[in-house]
Amino acid sequence: MAFRDWAHLPTVAVQLISEKVKSITDFVRFRAVCLPWRSASLPQPHHLPPQLSWLMIPYYPDPEHNRKDDGIRLFYDLWQSKMHKLHLPETSGKMCCASYRGWLVLVATQGTEVFLLNPLTRARIHLPPFTTPVKVFGVDKEDCQFEASYWFEPYIGNFVISKLSFSTNLTDPNCLIMVFLQRTSRTFFCRVGDTCWTMVNMQPREIRTAAFADATYHDGRFYLLSHEGVLRVYHLNDPGRRLVCSFPQELQSVTKILLEGKSGVYMVVVHQTESEDRGEEEVAQEDQDDLSDETKEGTEEGPKQKIELYQFLEQSLGIRQITDTSNTTIFYGDNHHCLAVCSDDWDLLRGGCMYMEYVCAPSASKDKGEACYGIYFTKLDDGKSKLVVHDLGESPRLWPTAPAMWFQPSFV
């Protein structure tokens, strides 16, 4: 019986096969088969669709509390029920604050170093530190700058970036990088190679008084969401232009998270509700219907909450509720780390649902009594939650810690 020499297929054939692979972990395995396959496939493939998210497990960034830090960071792959261990010594002594398009943003103690890191390729892009003077976007005087201490207090808690976004691929010299610091309620941006940050300007009376809960950037516009439920839009190419959108009363006192999409800016609204009593047969049936065998770990009920999705309409300065979420999957983590994936790109991904990182009590089989991280599956139409993964790592007692966040792996 003759065996085919798979290691010496024509290069064109190997390339065509590699372009059919959609999963980044499968692509890594594909390139590891043999040297000819590795040489024929691109090390940074552009054909891969947005990947299914991994959950990054928190760690202590402060070396005083983590003297034996080996730089190993944990990423839980929900779809393969596997914990990936990545050696990232660059993260030691750094706060991993947020993620975007396969990149993490890390900040050193006292803000002396800020950089982007791709955990898979180990590529780094340095950003301005939080110790240099800050420019103000929209101010007439080009040389107008404020001392860093005016906006950044010398305390690590004030350097925690809760939102990261950028306009194009980071290889583009015109790529704009936006960060939002929740503790100081400020939004800043820079371009690769800039030596200082620029603060998104507001009206003069707002610079010291406005407090924002979230922010994002999309298509040349900054979107700043205030605690009182007002969305302000600032145009990059027209500093004097500002749009204001006020939300209905019923949306002003609930949790709101801005979400960037392909066709605009969206808002996830979370209404906390009380749990409902249900019979054992109903619970068992929901577990069977909602959770796949690969992700089902238990039947413990999570927090019941009503989830709504809205799209911002700039022309009418209003919002429109998205009633059909059948092709949308939301991933929700700490500190407004939220992203969405189109379920149409993945055969095994259910739409109309949310996967939420949550700190919960340890399982009965766990010896220690420490709180740990779990993942809940929530249907968007009824808000019913079920625990699908448990005991993903103990919740650190000390503060500050790098937050749990969803991360989309990418080679580019």
Image (cartoon, helix red, strand yellow):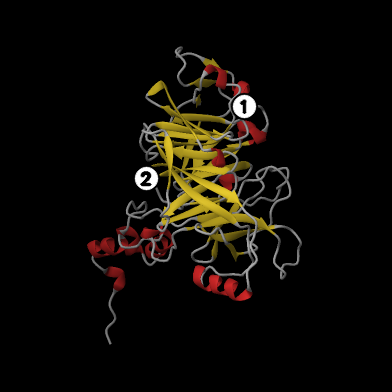
For label 2, the SS is: loop
For the residue marked with disc 2, what is the amino acid? Lys
Sequence-first disc among 2 and 1: 1
For label 1, the SS is: loop
- The dot on residue 152 is 1
Of 133 and 151, nearer the camera is 151
Q: Is residue 128 left or right of residue 48?
A: right
Image position, residue 308 (x, y; %): 50, 50
Of labels 2 and 1, the one closer to you: 2
Q: Quadrant of residue 313?
A: top left
Which residue is denoted by mark 2 in the rendering?
Answer: 262
Image position, residue 359 (x, y; %): 66, 55
- The dot on residue 237 is none
- For the view shown, which residue lies furthest in the front direction? 249
Q: Quadrant of residue 76?
A: bottom right
For the residue marked with disc 1, what is the amino acid? Phe
Q: Distance between the residues labelled 2 and 1?
A: 33 Å
Q: In this view, does 279 lie to the left or right of 201?
A: right
The mark tally for this picture is: 2
Does residue 366 appear anywhere in the picture? Answer: yes
